[in-house]
Image (cartoon, helix red, strand yellow):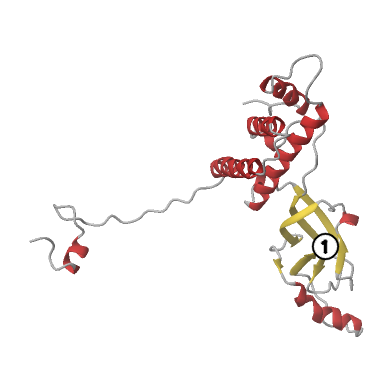
Amino acid sequence: MGALKTYLVSEMITDMRYELRDTNTTYQYADAELLVYINDISENIHQILIDNESEMVRNGSGTITTVAGTQSYDLGANTMGDLWVPHRVWVDTKEPMTMCEEWELFDSINLEEDSQTGHRAEPWKYCIIEDYIWFKEVPDAAYTVRLKYYPNYVDLATSDACPFRHIFNQDIKKGAALLAKNRNEMDVQIDAVLKDFYEQVSQKVMKRRRFKPVSVSPAKRRSRRGFNYGRTARLGGGRR
């Protein structure tokens, strides 16, 4: 059909000035200020999309090669320092691992401290602690572990393209303009109103991008008067 729309943040700022009636030679709002508002709205949307597990922001990925006897791995050292929320972790070609709690690591940690190695195995459970991924099973060999995750939000520059495949361009622009108009009001309700609005907008978009299971409910037989036969029988035969 065609290429992805191109709309730069700098273009959004120019369009915002028309909404703000700020087109004179001496601007009331500096570009840097409007960029702050755009990033504020965009990061809120980013977080809402993560909370709803949207594939639109599930674009982080990386690999870790385990070392026999090493239970934890620095995400940053493995080019995944931007990991906010893991989506799927798996040993190459295997089923996804399950997430465990931190206390489940203690047995393996204690065994390693006691120089016991017979418990080592292929990892199949993991947990995230600060900037590290830990495996419940201490690896007994080198395995390629793959991660798919939701990364942190990265602030936009004026030269960047607008985020989220341009789906929320109008919403980001109007929300940022609203923040600009009310910058001196100190009204805490504005943030609450905006967050609620973008929650609704993001839900509508995601529903259209996801598979919708179809369920069929059997129809109930009704009497001529519109009463359900089962209900009528329980009520003693209906009206008299």
- Residue in the picture at 18% in, 52% down: 226
Residue in the foreground of this view, choosing between 84 and 235:
235
The quarter of the displayed image where residue 2 is located: top right
Q: Is residue 80 above or below residue 90?
A: above
Residue in the foreground of this view, choosing between 240 and 109:
240
Q: How many marks?
A: 1
Quadrant where the image shows the C terminus:
bottom left
The quarter of the displayed image where residue 146 is located: bottom right
Q: Is residue 173 above or below residue 17?
A: below
- The local secondary structure at tag 1 comes to loop
Residue in the foreground of this view, choosing between 65 and 13:
13
Please provide percent x and percent y for residue 88. Answer: 71, 58
Residue lying at the far left in this picture: please name it: 240
Q: Is residue 172 above or below residue 96?
A: above
- Residue in the picture at 68% in, 35% down: 165
Q: Amino acid at mark 1?
A: Glu
Residue lying at the far top in this picture: please name it: 25
Along the horizontal axis of the image, is 215 left or right of 211? left
Please provide percent x and percent y for residue 234. Answer: 19, 68
Along the horizontal axis of the image, is 218 left or right of 113? left
- Can residue 159 be seen here? The reply is no
- Residue in the picture at 73% in, 34% down: 184
Q: Are there few (<14), some (14-19), or many (20+) residues within 10 Å of tag 1?
A: few
Residue in the foreground of this view, choosing between 143 and 46:
46
Please provide percent x and percent y for residue 90. Answer: 74, 61
Where does label 1 land, which residue?
A: 130
Please provide percent x and percent y for residue 214. Answer: 44, 50
- Can residue 68 be seen here? The reply is yes
Quadrant where the image shows the N terminus:
top right
Along the horizontal axis of the image, is 164 left or right of 214? right
